Image: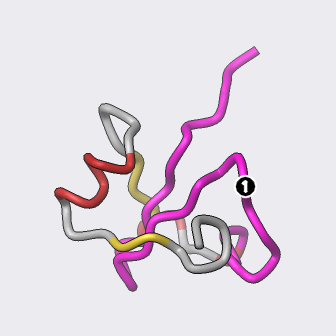
Amino acid sequence: MESLAGYLGNRSNRIVHHLGNMKKECEIYQMKMQDREYFTPDTIENAKSKNFVECKFCMG
């Protein structure tokens, strides 16, 4: 079984979400495929280094 990445960034608004703590307010399922960014390594520090900010719903 393939595991989910820990973090998913939205390129259009520069918000990063924690996939293990998703909330309906995150609206991840409405995110366009071309706006999705996965991080390697899959860490919040890496996402922040690429100018993403933490989602207030799933990481707040």
In the rendered image, the vertical position of residue 42 relative to residue 24, given as above or below: above
The secondary structure type at the circle numbered 1 is: helix
Q: Is residue 36 left or right of residue 24?
A: left
The image quarter containing residue 14 is bottom left
**Residue at image coords 72%, 55%:** 21
Q: Is residue 36 above or below residue 45?
A: below
Q: Which residue in the structure is indicated by mark 1?
A: 21
Q: Residue at x 28, y 48 (%)?
A: 45
Residue 10, above or below 2: below
Residue 37 position, x and y percent, is: 39, 56
Tell me where residue 43 sits by quadrant.
Answer: top left
Seen at 41% across and 47% down, the residue is: 38
Could you say which quadrant of the image residue 23 lies in? Answer: bottom right
Point out the image quarter for the C terminus.
bottom right
Position of the N terminus by quadrant:
top right
Range covered by the magenta-colored residues? 1-29
Is residue 19 magenta-colored? yes
Q: Is 16 one of the magenta-colored residues? A: yes
Q: Nearer the viewer, residue 29 or 5?
A: 5
- Which kind of residue does numbered mark 1 sit on? Asn
Residue 28 against residue 39 in the figure, above or below = below
